[in-house]
Image (tube, rainbow, N blue to C red):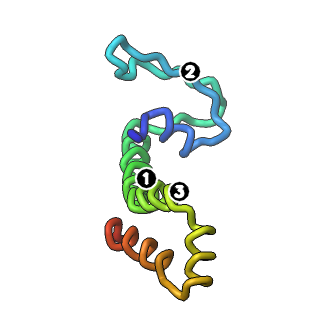
Amino acid sequence: MIVSFCDALSSLVPEASFAAFYNDDDSLNRVIWETETAQPTDAEVNAEVIRLQAAYDALEYSRLRKAKYDLLNQDEMRYDDVKNSTTTWVDAIDAIKVAHPKP
């Protein structure tokens, strides 16, 4: 995901109402501020874009892990491990955590 100018505006002033207009190449053309609250400066919005993008990027490992976890039939694996005295489920989870480590 790429954090947009509008995402940052919504983060900085959640109650704000505004309209964003884009060029044909999807670049932001202008924003019409429709709220009495003061509009953040471009510098404030750009800093928020950077902050939000860093927060999103920092959780990539979590999204990758979840996608892998979802492919496992974990209930079945845990049941089979109990019945067979094996560690298949734990081994699978450990392998995913090694493949996608938490920073």
Q: Which residue is drawn at 52% across and 38% down?
A: 9
N-terminal label among 2 and 3? 2
Q: Crowding near pointer 1: few (<14 within 10 Å), some, many (20+)?
A: some
Mark 2 and mark 1: span between their CA atoms? 24 Å
Say which amino acid is labelled 1: Tyr
Kindly identify the residue that appears in the image at 54 percent across and 45 percent down.
12
Pick the front one: 19 or 88 = 88
Q: Are marks 2 and 3 in contact (CB under 8 Å)?
A: no
Q: How many labels does the image show?
A: 3
Frontmost residue, 4 versus 97: 97
Q: Disc 1 marks which residue?
A: 56
Marks 3 and 1 sit apart, C-alpha to C-alpha, by: 20 Å
Q: Quadrant of the N terminus?
A: top left
Q: Earlier in the sequence, mark 2 or mark 1?
A: 2
* Helix, strand or loop at mark 2: strand
**Residue annotated with mark 3:** 70
Q: Nearer the viewer, mark 2 or mark 1?
A: 1
> Mark 2 or mark 3: which is in front?
3
Q: Which residue is drawn at 34% across and 70% down?
A: 101
Q: Which amino acid does label 2 sit on?
A: Ala
Coordinates of residue 76 in the picture (x, y in percent): 60, 68
Of the numbered discs 3 and 1, the one sitting upstream in the chain is 1
Quadrant in which residue 61 is drawn: bottom left
- Residue 13 on image: x %, y %: 59, 42
Q: Name the residue under label 2.
A: 19
Residue at (56%, 71%) from the top-left corner? 77
> Left or right of 12: which side holds 103?
left
